[in-house]
């Protein structure tokens, strides 16, 4: 997006226009996100630490909170510059498109960052969604679910899901876009 620094205390009209063009937010919403970012404090070198981002009520109980921060962090540390933070909230907004949401969901579920969802990625996703052992599913149940997902969704038989195959799954899930959001 642009070059935003921690010394900025307000957004210029040009920056607001730029941010409005590249997000799903209105100018008013961008200003609100900016104030929220500043209120979380702890901005060092123009970045907000992952630990402070995770204090947001919108993320605190999300089982994917660490992955979300890493995916949206330009340097993969989980620390977010304002533009990373704005992107994250924009993608999770009600007005973001299904395509944008599915693209980021795929990246969040791709734990090994190899551009495919393999069985291990699916197992980690299922465990985060359903819990493990005494609180959730047993390991053999998680493995069965991962195998079933691959059996039904792996169209080319390579034992992993490409983004295109993942998109096909998302298209069959009418509530996906509704559930992949964060209220700010």
Image (spheres, rainbow, N blue to C red):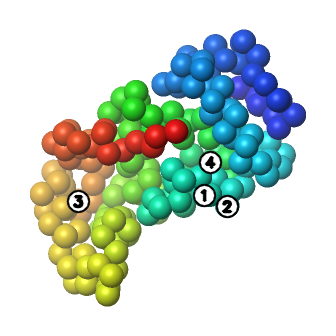
The outermost residue toward the right is 7
Per the model, the C-alpha gap separating discs 1 and 2 is 5 Å
Which of 63 and 73 lies nearest the eye of the viewer? 63
- Within 10 Å of disc 4 (Cα), the crowding (few <14, some 14-19, many 20+) is many
Residue 51 marker: 2
Q: Earlier in the sequence, mark 3 or mark 2?
A: 2
Q: Earlier in the sequence, mark 4 or mark 2?
A: 2
Per the model, the C-alpha gap separating discs 4 and 3 is 30 Å
Label 1 element class: loop
Label 3 element class: loop
Is residue 43 visible to the viewer in this orientation of the structure? yes
Q: In the image, is 157 to the left or to the right of 105? A: left
Which of 6 and 159 lies nearest the eye of the viewer? 6
* Label 3 vs label 2, nearer the camera: 2
Label 4 element class: loop
Q: Residue at x 54, y 19 (%)?
A: 26
* Label 4 vs label 1, nearer the camera: 1
* Label 3 vs label 1, nearer the camera: 1
Which x, y percent locates residue 29?
A: 57, 25
Which x, y percent locates residue 64?
A: 46, 60
Residue 68 marker: none
Instruction: Provide the residue designation for mark 3.
Output: 158
Q: In the image, is 171 to the left or to the right of 22? A: left
Q: Residue at x 27, y 59 (%)?
A: 160
The outermost residue toward the bottom is 134
Residue 54 marker: 1
Label 2 element class: helix
- Within 10 Å of disc 1 (Cα), the crowding (few <14, some 14-19, many 20+) is some
């Amino acid at each position: 997006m642009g070059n935003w620094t921690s010394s900025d205390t307000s957004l210029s009209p040009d920056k607001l226009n730029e941010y409005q063009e590249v997000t799903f937010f209105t100018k008013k919403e961008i200003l609100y996100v900016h104030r929220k970012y500043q209120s979380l404090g702890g901005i060092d070198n123009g970045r907000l630490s992952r630990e402070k981002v995770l204090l947001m009520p919108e993320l605190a109980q999300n089982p994917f909170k660490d992955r979300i921060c890493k995916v949206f962090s330009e340097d993969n540390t989980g620390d977010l510059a304002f533009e990373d933070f704005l992107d994250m909230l924009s993608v999770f907004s009600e007005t973001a498109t299904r395509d944008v949401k599915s693209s980021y969901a795929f990246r969040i579920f791709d734990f090994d960052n190899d551009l495919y969802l393999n069985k291990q990625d699916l197992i980690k996703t299922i465990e985060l969604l359903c819990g493990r052992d005494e609180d959730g599913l047993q390991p053999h149940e998680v493995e069965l679910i991962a195998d079933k997902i691959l059996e039904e969704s792996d169209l080319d038989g390579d034992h992993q899901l490409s983004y295109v195959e993942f998109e096909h799954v998302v298209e069959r899930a009418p509530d996906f876009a509704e559930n992949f959001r964060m209220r700010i």
